[in-house]
Structures are given as C-alpha cells and as structure tokens.
Amino acid sequence: MPIAEKTVRQSVSLPARVARRVKSLAQSRNMSANRVIVGLVESALDAREREKTRFIELADRLARSRDPEEQKRLKDELARMTFGE
C-alpha cells in the first residue's frame, strides 16, 4: 500500500479567468478543481527544474567551449533563457 503524502491546506486566490479555465478543465477530465490545480503546480515546478538544469548544462558547455562560434550561440541561448529575448 503506498504511503500517503501529508497535505497542507493552502488558500490561493485566482483571477476569474484562470478560475474558469481550471473549472472547465476539471469538468472535462472529471476531476476536482483542487486536483487540477495540484497537477498544474506540480507540472510548473517540474518545468522550472528542467529549465534550471538546462541552463546549468549550457553554462557548463560555454565554460568548456573553445570555439568562438559555439560560444556566441551558447551566450545567445542563455540570454534568451534569462531575458526572453
């Protein structure tokens, strides 16, 4: 039997537009809005961790690179990740 993870009650205010989307998604998946929100938050946290890992990998490659072309490409990619440009 799996061990249940302890839950913490957390109150969150959502903009009306977001709340409508969550409710619609919950209804279409036959889930509670709470479960949808938990899934979305978990997905966002996982995505953030992957983004951080990707950034560190690129920074490591930049530090090891001796090719000026690759260095420029890596710098540009890191700048896009950081500044969204």
Image: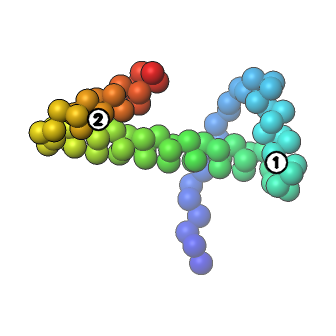
Indicate whether 6 appears above or below 18: below
Q: Position of residue 5 (x, y in %)?
A: 56, 59
**Which residue lies most toward the bottom here?**
1
Q: Residue at x 14, y 42 (%)?
A: 64
Closest to the observer, 4 or 64: 64
Q: Is residue 25 above or below residue 10?
A: below
Vertical placement of 27 versus 62: above or below?
below
Judge from the rendering whether residue 54 lies leftward or rightward of residue 69; answer left or right.
right
Q: Please state the total of marks drawn on the protein image.
A: 2
Q: Quadrant of residue 56?
A: top left
- Can residue 78 be spotted in the picture? no
Q: Is residue 80 visible?
A: yes
Q: Which residue is labeled 1 in the image?
A: 26
50 sits to left or right of 29: left
What amino acid is labelled 1 in the image?
Answer: Ala
Name the quadrant of the C terminus. top left
Please give the residue where the numbered disc 2 appears in the rendered image.
74
Between residues 76 and 41, which one lies in front from this camera angle? 76
Say few, some or many: other residues with alpha carbon within 10 Å of mark 1 (under 14 / 14 to 19 / 20 or more). Answer: some
For the N terminus, the image quarter is bottom right
Q: Position of residue 7 (x, y in %)?
A: 60, 50
The secondary structure type at the circle numbered 2 is helix
Q: At which x and y percent is residue 13?
A: 71, 26
The reply to whether the C-beta atoms of the residues labelled 1 and 2 are less than 8 Å apart is: no
The quadrant holding residue 60 is top left
Residue 81: image location, x then y, percent: 41, 30
Element class at badge 1: helix
**Residue drawn at (76%, 30%) of the image:** 18
Rendered residue at 36%/32% (across/down): 77
Looking at this rendering, what residue extends furthest in the front direction? Answer: 69
Q: For this rendering, which residue is in front, 36 or 54?
A: 54
